[in-house]
Amino acid sequence: MMTPIKRSLLTLASSALLTLAATGLQAADKHLAITQIVEHPALDAVRQGVQDELAERGYSVGTNLKWSYESAQGSPATAAQIAKKFAGESPDVIVAIATPSAQAAAASARGIPLVFTAVTDPVGAKLVKGLDQPGRFITGMTDMSPINKHMALVKAVVPGAQRLGVIYNPGEANSVSLVTLVNEEAPKQGMSVVEAAATKSSDVQTAARSLVGKVDAIYLPTDNTVISALEAIIKVAEQNRIPVITGDTDSVARGAVAAQGFNYYEVGRQTGIMVARILKGESPADMPVEGVERVELFVNPGAAQRMGITLDSALVDSAKSVVE
C-alpha cells in the first residue's frame, strides 16, 4: 500500500514530467517576427521567399511557426515603433527587410537574433562590423548592386547618353552608397550625373520632372522610396521620351525599359536558409554576411518605344525575360 509520503513524491514527479513535456512542446514552436520598410514587388518577393524556404525546412506558418509581419509603409519612425514592439515580444528571430527596418531592429533587438536582407551596404549602415565576421547578434544578406554593369547597360540601351539622371532618397543609407558608386562609374562610360532627391514617395514625381531637359536617360537604383512610386516616374518619362533603366528587375513589367538585377525571390530563399540555421541553434555572430552573385537582364521593348528608343536586337536576345 502506498504511503502518503510516497503518493506525494509520485505526484510531484508526475507534475515535473508534465512540465518538461509541455516545455518540450513549446520549444518545438518557433516565433519569427518580420519587419519591412515598404511594400513593393521586390521586397514582397523577398518575404515570400523566406516563408517558402522555411516551409521546405519544416517550419510551417500557423502549424509550428508563429509569423508576425508588419510594414512601416515607408516611414522610418513607424519602423522604429515596429522594432520596439517586436523586441518586447522576444521572438526567436527577427527578419528585417531593407536598410531602414534593419537599422531600427538593430537598435531595439537587444540580443534577439536579427537577420537583415535586401540591405545594400550593411557595414556602411553600421549593422555589422565586417562581412566575414559580423559580430554581435546580427547577420544577413547584402544586395549590393553591380553598378559598373548597370552603367554599361545604360549605354547599351541609350548609346548616345551623356547626361544621366539619378533619382534617390538621400535619407536611405543604401541609396547614398549606390549613388556614390554611380558617380564613380558613370564617367567611365562617358556620362555625367544629375541627381534628383526625393525624401518620400510623394516627392518622386517632382524629382522626375526636375530632370526633364537636363538628362538623356534616367537610372533608378534599388531605392525603396523611389521604386515604390515608380509609376509616377514612368508617366513623366513617357511624356518626355526619356528612357528609364533600373537596378530592380520587377520594375520592367511596371514600365521601365530595362533592368539588370537580382531575383529577389531567390534572395528571400537564401535568407530563409540563414534563418533556419539560427532556429536550429547557430549563432548569427558566427555566420558571415552573404551576397548574391548572379544577375539577370529584363527588357521591355514596348516601354522603350514609348520612351522614344528602339532596343538593339542582340540586347533583347540576351535577356532572361522580355516583357511584351
Image (cartoon, rainbow, N blue to C red):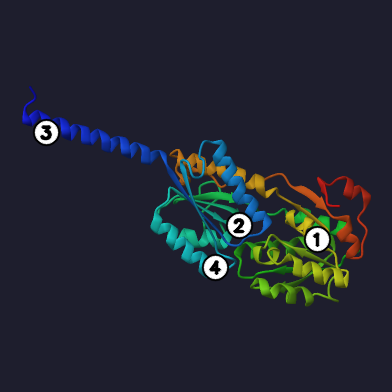
Marks 2 and 3 in Cβ contact (< 8 Å): no
- Mark 2 or mark 3: which is in front? 3
Q: Return the residue at label 2.
A: 121
Residue 258 rendering spot, x and y as whole percentages: 81, 56
In the image, which disc is placed on residue 76?
A: 4
Tell me the SS state at disc 4: helix
Residue 313 rendering spot, x and y as whole percentages: 93, 50
Q: Residues within 10 Å of mark 3 (few under 14, many from 20)?
A: few
Q: Is residue 150 visible?
A: yes
Sequence-wise, the earlier of marks 1 and 3 is: 3
Tell me the SS state at disc 3: helix
- Mark 2 or mark 4: which is in front? 4
Sequence-wise, the earlier of marks 2 and 3 is: 3
Marks 1 and 3 in Cβ contact (< 8 Å): no
Sequence-wise, the earlier of marks 2 and 1 is: 2
Tell me the SS state at disc 1: loop
Name the amino acid type tagged 3.
Ser
Name the amino acid type tagged 4.
Pro
In three-dimensional space, the C-alpha distance between marks 2 and 4, rounded to whole angstroms, equals: 17 Å
Q: Please, which residue is most extreme toward the front here?
A: 1
For image coordinates 67% across by 54% down, the residue present is 42
In the image, which disc is placed on residue 8?
A: 3
